[in-house]
Image (spheres, helix red, strand yellow):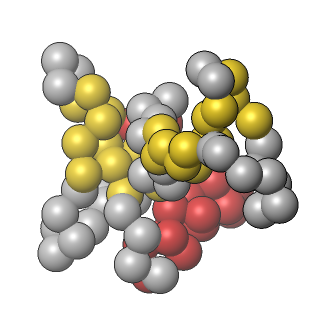
Amino acid sequence: MTRDEWKERLPLIQAFVEGKTIQYLDIGHGWVNVPSDLGIRLNDNISNYRIKPEPKVIWVRGGKVYPYNPYLKGFQKFVEVTDE
């Protein structure tokens, strides 16, 4: 493996070491969590792996989405799970 290929894989390796969830793109099933005891195969096509995105928190009032502002009242908090 070349130095550039290692650099490409480094964010996944770091995330795995930090305990973050790694996902694999499974044709027909979408993004699937990789079991933590299994790990990732470094010789696989790296574009088939990703770090699971964190859910986005959005604030809604009157059907409109707003950026969070702790001083505004009457907002509802929603967690938007993204599967980009």
Residue 61: where, in percent of width, then height? 65, 32
Question: Picture quarter containing residue 62?
Answer: top right
Q: Position of residue 71 (x, y in %)?
A: 83, 60
From the viewer's perspective, is 76 left or right of 66? left
Residue 46 visible here = no
Decide if residue 31 is in sight here: yes
Left or right side of 10 for 18: left
Identify which residue is drawn at 27% across, 27% down: 30
The count of marks equals: 0
The extreme bottom residue here reads: 18
Q: Is 23 placed left or right of 84 in the picture?
A: left
Residue 22 image position (x, y, % from top left)? 37, 57
Residue drawn at (43%, 51%) of the image: 52
Which of 74 and 63 lies nearest the eye of the viewer? 74
| 11, 63: nearer the viewer | 63
Tell which of 84 and 15 is nearer to you. Answer: 84
Q: Is residue 32 above or below residue 17?
A: above
Tell me: 57 left or right of 21.
right
Residue nearer the viewer, 55 or 39: 55
What residue appears at the point 23 percent right and 42 percent down from the top-left corner? 32
Q: Is residue 44 above or below residue 16?
A: above
- Residue 27, image x and y in percent? 22, 21
